[in-house]
Amino acid sequence: MATVLTLTGSASAPGSSRTARLVQHLGRELTAQGHQVHGLDVRTLPADALLAADTSHPAVADAVALVEGADALLVGTPVYKAAYSGVLKTFLDLLPQYALRGKSVLPLATGGSPAHVLAVDYALRPVLTSLGADVAQGWFVLDRHITAADDGTVSLTPDADAGLAPVVARWRDALAKPQRLAAA
Ligand SMILES: Cc1cc2nc3c(=O)[nH]c(=O)nc-3n(C[C@H](O)[C@H](O)[C@H](O)COP(=O)(O)O)c2cc1C
């Protein structure tokens, strides 16, 4: 079983972020399947240290260590201005150049318009690739297709679930085979 980091980069408060709630939901599924899952919401890191790329700050150093220790990452971002969020980018920018080498990464985005469905592939994927990640097929979920209840449960419309579930399943199946991660 793999050590997985769920990394989210929404500017919304974690409790109201549909991106964070969706990623947490998928993280709970991974935990139920026996993976060791850690969560990191970039918004919770100190803003001054992030903006200064201060990797000596203990909270930032701990976050970088979570990346180093992960076999795989699920990276979730809202689409802002047709790309990933600046919040997420502040963290990715302070990682070492090949921080994601040998790690399987599933990119997910939530957005308000199907016009920006390709932000996953045209904006986020190249950044993850430049960090050395083995980037799996990603997915985009429309915000209005996500319902997050007060008790933490998340549901998707049937159409959204039919699109996302196979993408997550393919990535998850690869995690169940650690020898493939090691060979990557
Ligand atoms: C500043 C801002 C810019 C946005 N720009 C886009 C955009 O260019 N394309 C899009 O599809 N949605 C855009 N949205 C909508 C968000 O991507 C969408 O509502 C997302 O699910 C919000 O995620 P969150 O709940 O984690 O904040 C934007 C939202 C904000 C607040």
Image (cartoon, helix red, strand yellow):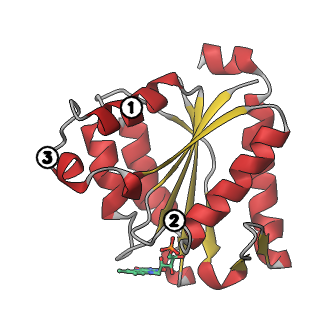
**Residue 136 location in percent, x, y?**
62, 43
Q: Quadrant of the C terminus?
A: top right
Q: CA distance from mark 1 to mark 3?
A: 16 Å
**Residue 7 location in percent, x, y?**
51, 48
Label 3 SS: loop
Quadrant containing ligand 1 reads: bottom left
**Residue 19 location in percent, x, y?**
56, 66
Q: Which residue is mark 1?
A: 62
Left or right for 137, reference 35: left
Q: What is the residue that sits farthest to the left in this orientation?
A: 52
The residue drawn where x is 60% and y is 80% is 143
Q: Which residue is mark 2?
A: 14
Left or right for 111, reference 122: right
Label annotation for residue 122: none
Q: CA distance from mark 3 to mark 2?
A: 23 Å
Earlier residue among tags 2 and 1:
2
**Residue 96 location in percent, x, y?**
29, 28
Q: Are marks 3 and 2 in contact (CB under 8 Å)?
A: no
Looking at the picture, does residue 147 appear above or below residue 97? below
Q: Which residue is mark 3?
A: 52
Earlier residue among tags 1 and 3:
3
Earlier residue among tags 3 and 2:
2
Looking at the picture, does residue 32 appear above or below residue 9? above
Amino acid type at circle 1 is Asp
Label 2 SS: loop
The residue drawn where x is 27% and y is 51% is 46
Q: CA distance from mark 2 to mark 1?
A: 19 Å
The residue drawn where x is 34% and y is 50% is 45
